[in-house]
Structure formats: structure tokens, C-alpha cells
Image (cartoon, rainbow, N blue to C red):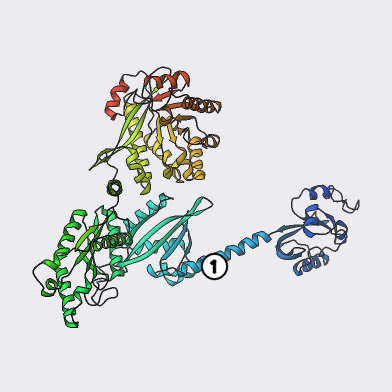
Amino acid sequence: MIPHEPGLLAAPGLLLGADQWLEGLEGPAWLVDASDWTVRLVNRPALAWLGLGLAQCLGQPAEALLPGLEDQVFWSELRAGHPGQLASDTEVLRPQGLAQVHRRIVPLGVPARAYLVTVQDRSQEARAASERETLLAELRATLESTADGILVLDTAGRIRAFNRRFAQLWDLPEEALAEPADAAVLDWMRRSVLQPEAYQQRVDEINAQLLVSGTDAVALLNGRLLERYTQPQWSQGRPIGRVYSFRELARSRATAPVSAGASGLDGSTGWPNRHRFLEELDEAVLQARDDGQPLAVLVVEFDRHALFAADGSARARGMDELVEALRATVREPAQVGRLGAARFAVLLRPAGESAAEALARRLVQLATRPGPALLATAGLKVHVGGAVYPQAGWCGEELLQHAEKALQRARGAGVAGWELHRGSTEQVHEGRRQQRLEQAVREGLSSTAFRLQFQARFASASGEIQAMEALLRWQDPQEGLMLPPRFMPLAERAGLMRALDDWALEQAVQQAVAWAHKGWHQALTVNVSGETLAEPAYARRVAAVLAHAGWPARQLELDVTETALRRDPEAALSNLDALHRLGVRLVLDDWGLDDCALNWLRRVPFTAVKIDRRLLRAVPDHGAEADLVRGLTQVARAMGLQVLAEGVEHEAQRAFVTDTLGCQGWQGLLGSAALDPRACERVLARQVRPTVALALR
């Protein structure tokens, strides 16, 4: 409390105890006596902020502590008998320098016996705003300097920024540049594409998956074909919006035919030059991603020294013969481009390795076939390098680079020949596998492509079936039935996990409802991926699925791994809290594999933990592993959690988890293998009180 002269503000009622409540204010504040317009009370924050002592403040004129022109005018008006109050921003000279402040002056009492002056220092906010303006100016300069069209949206779909190149590509009206109306701009984009419904459907898919990144093509009515690349915008570990980048690939052939003299074409052959060929290759890759068909790129190089050793007329004749030979060998719909003096590129689509090898052989044989005299007599060598999508790369530039590296290897042999870029066997298989997986998801998650199998979980006390774990399988047309470890990483890399998770949840609920109609009342446990758990709308989607099927939330368990939690902890916690409030039970899967899992047990309202199968492989024979599992079980119980075990394969393990550890439930090959739903029904029919839990793994 700041001392003051007794009785100065001791007016009846209103100002009694003013010194106490003034000192209770957090910010700088003081009272001005309306009888003589001098400062009578000052709190400690005000003295510290002003850098003055108490004696320097008390008794000073009202405008002395804030001597700005607006304050002087305000106090003069009050002295003249014109009551009022003041609230505005001003600048104040402090010992540390000029400060940006917001001060309020309000009367106390009717009529006013005193005026309360409060000050809020906004210097830091002003500096931050200035820095933001500087950063925004730099951002605008950066956006304007790029050759791509950039559009930045926040999570609500509002436009945060775009550059003039974006406006040019989309032919935005001039008024949109100065003051963009979000809805009008986005509607303009929808009305500017050749297929508005398909375009809007894709936009909705992107908006529904906040963390997805991807590339596709957009055809505009103005004849442009744009490559659209989208990725989330991050700040402090959280997605705050989305960035779209648009690059013109080529003019639509239907609206903008290319003539031989157009820019980007080689003058002597009429074929695309390197830049134009890359644009067409990028367009072909985008189409290949959509239809799942492979494509091949060949780079053909002729021995220019042998070809052009003759005089000028022979050299021209040799080039003409070479172009005609290529035209006769490379038939439509293959596309040819000229990369250099005697180097050409060929785009084959659709075509795999066998088609690329067949054409490479024909190209190498050009110099030995009967035909043009110069080609046959010049001792011409032909070298070919090739690369196939998707095994050799995922964009045009990467494919062309791999094809040219393969050409260098072919040329290094010293004789005419060809080489195809070949990664490791596993890389080749993985590329093909991912392409088939993407195609299967795009065509729809049909029952023939994906399915659920179920493995029983047993109650330790009674030995009855306690749960059925649903395992996702993919029926690959070439490699047969595939387990999750072989295709889940591919799905994560391609951004397909949300589609798979949603399909598995819906199928699991439908199967549980069908079993319920037969008298088996099942609880469902869905093991969700980190990609899906990080989506803000995931909890709402789960609630919608349950409501649509009429399945109670209390009979749903959600299996979550620590890896899934780490992808976006804040978004995951938000979803899990919402699901917990809904009534869903939460289980920490793979318990014991990570050192930091204990932290998640404190932050997430789990009801149980599931000991990972990899920890049970060595128990009970190996003492160290057995002690570790015992310790993990004790920790879980101390936190009020149930303990489950998976991967039980022999009787000694079962006795260990049930008798020694006291786990409430266990599963593994000792009890049951994974079965199709119909086979599971025969098992369930033998149980008196079956309870089913489904978990996607």
C-alpha cells in the first residue's frame, strides 16, 4: 500500500478504502482528486513503470504523469466543467525510451469525486506487430518473386495470402488483388475449371485431411493445365493452414493446339525441346498417378562425331535421315523430344520395363538396319538409357535424370547398347506395390481388395473369449494376401491411412452389429494410425459412425500406439479427450517398447495397456525380460489401469501372463489364429457370454 495524506480522499462511501483496492490492481494506476485536480494516490506498479518516487507523484497536476497533448486537453475540459472520460492509445517518454500505451481515465462517483487513471503498456505488442508487418512484407516479396502461383489458406478456409502469379494463372478479376473476398475467389476458382464437380470433390477431400500433402493436375477453361501441389502450413508444431502451389504444365490440347513454330519446340524437328518435354512428362506422371498405369522414359544418344564428320550438306542430310529413322521406329502414341544436338527423349505410356526394353533394342539397331546410306556407312553408335515410373521415380525430373544416368552407363561400355535404371529388387517391388495399393484405394475399398480377419482374445480368469481383434488384410492381385507390415508403410507414405482407418472402423461396426443380431453383444476396439488421429475431425467421424450404426460408445475401445501419439501430440490429445467424453475406452498399445510411454499414461485417460508381443518372446525363460515385464505391469496397476497381453504362443507364456502377471486378458497363436468372420462365428457360438473387441492393426 502506498502511503498518502490522511483524509484527502475520504469522501463518504465511494472512496473509502480506495488505497487498498488501488494497490490490488495489477497494472499502473493512480487517482486524481476532482477538487483540486492533483494526484492523490499511486500504486506500486505505477511508480515502477514511471520510474519515479512517491514524493515526485503525489500533489502533482493531473496531466503531469502523462503529459501528452490529448491528456492536457482532456484535463482542461474537466476543469472547465465538461465531464467525460478518455480511452485511447498514446506515446509516453519513459526512462527506457518511448513507450506505446493504452490509458483510460474514468470518473468515480456521481458527481465525480475522483478520476481513476490506468495504463496498459503495449510496447511489446507494438514491436511484435511491427515485426509481423516486416515479416509479412518479406513474405509478400518472396511470394511475388516465385514463378509459381501461391495461395495460402487458414484452417477455416479463409485466404491469408496469394501472389499475382496465382491471380494470373486463374485469371482473377483485378479487384480481387486489392481486397480479396474469400468466398468469391474460391467460387471463381471452382467455376474456372473444366470439371467443377470433380474439382470441388478433390478440394473437399483435401480439406477433410488437414495433414495431407499431394500433387495433382487441374485443367482450366482458359486452356491452362496446372500442377497443384498442396501441403499443410505449420506453426509451433501445429497445422495452422494450407499452402497451394500452382505451376503451369502445358496448354490443354483441346483449347490451345501447339503449332510447329510455338515456343518450346525444336526448330529443325518440330519436337518438344527439353523444357517442353519435361512439362509433358510431368503431365504424364500426374495422369499415371490417377489411372495407375506405368510409363517409361528413354533417352537416345547418337554418336554425333561419326554423324557430323562429313561436310555441311552431308551433316544436314544425316540429321534428316536420323529424324526420319526415329519417326519410323517410335510410333504414336509415344512422344519424342529433342534434348540436344544428337540426344533425344521418348515418352512411352502406358509402358513397363518390357515395352521399354523392346523399343531400346530397336533404337540401338537403327545404325545396322538396311536403309539410309549415311546412317549405315558412318559407323554410327546408338546408346539408350531408360527409366520406368513408379519404380525409378515419382516426378518427371527424377525419371529423366535416372534415364540419363542409365545412358551414361550404356555409353561407358564402349559399344552400342542400352541400359535401364534399376534400383534394388525391394525398391522395384515396393514401387509397384505402392502403385497397386493407391489404385485399390482410388477404385474404392471393396471387399475383394481389403478384408478383416479376427483373432480371439481370452479372459485370464474364465478362459472364455473376451475379445476378437480385427486385422486388416490387403488382397494384392499379384502378391496375394498381404499382412499390415508389408503395406501399411506404403499407405502412410502415400497418405492413404485415413481412408483405410475409416473403412476398417465402418466394417468393424457393421460386423459387430450383425453379430449382435445373432445374440453376441460385442465391444469394438479400433487401432487408429497417427495420420488419422492427428486430424481435427476424427472424433466427430467416430461419433457419426457410431450414431449411424446405433452402436453405443461405451462398447468401443480405441487402441493407440505411442508412435501415433507422437505424430501430432496436441491434435491427438484433443481427439482422445473428446472420445473419452463420448464414452470410448482408450488402450495404450505396444506397452513397454518406448521409454517415454509413462508420460502418455499421465496425459491420456487410458483404461488399459497392452504388453507388446515382442516383450513376451523371451519370457518366462529369460530372467531380465521377465523382470522388465513384471515392472511394467506393476506400473500400470499403480496407475489404476488394466493389463492385457498379446503374442502368447505357448503354455508357459500363458501361465506367466495369467498367473504371474495377473493380466486380465491374453491373445496369441496358442489360443487362436486369425480367422475369417464366418469361422469366428463358429468359435463365438460355443461361448456362453461372448464379448467382441475389434482392433485394426
> Residue at (91%, 53%) from the top-left corner?
5
> Residue at (53%, 25%) from the top-left corner?
634
Q: Quick one: 587 or 377, which is closer to the camera?
A: 377
Q: Percent x, y for residue 10?
A: 88, 50
Q: Is residue 156 left or right of residue 111?
A: left
Look at the picture and state if 460 lies above or below 340: above
Q: Amino acid at mark 1?
A: Ala
Q: Secondary structure under badge 1?
A: helix
Q: Quick one: 45 or 284, which is closer to the camera?
A: 284
Q: Percent x, y for residue 394?
A: 32, 56
Q: Is residue 591 left or right of residue 278?
A: right
Q: Is residue 71 left or right of residue 401?
A: right
> Residue placed farthest to the front in the image?
414
> Residue placed farthest to the right in the image?
6
Choose top left, top right, bottom left or bottom right for residue 247.
bottom left
Look at the picture and state if 159 lies above or below 305: above
Q: Percent x, y for residue 216?
A: 34, 58
Choose top left, top right, bottom left or bottom right for residue 350.
bottom left
Which residue carries the number 1 mark? 137
Please say whether residue 617 is visible from this viewpoint: yes
Q: Quick one: 439 or 193, which is closer to the camera?
A: 439
Q: Which quarter of the image is occupied by the C terminus?
A: top left
Q: Quick one: 220 or 415, which is closer to the camera?
A: 415
Q: Is residue 68 left or right of residue 326?
A: right
Look at the picture and state if 424 lies above or below 87: above
> Residue at (47%, 37%) from the top-left corner?
579
Q: Percent x, y for residue 47?
A: 81, 56
Q: Callout 1: few (<14), some (14-19), or many (20+) C-alpha neighbours within 10 Å?
A: few
Please say whether residue 270 is visible from this viewpoint: no
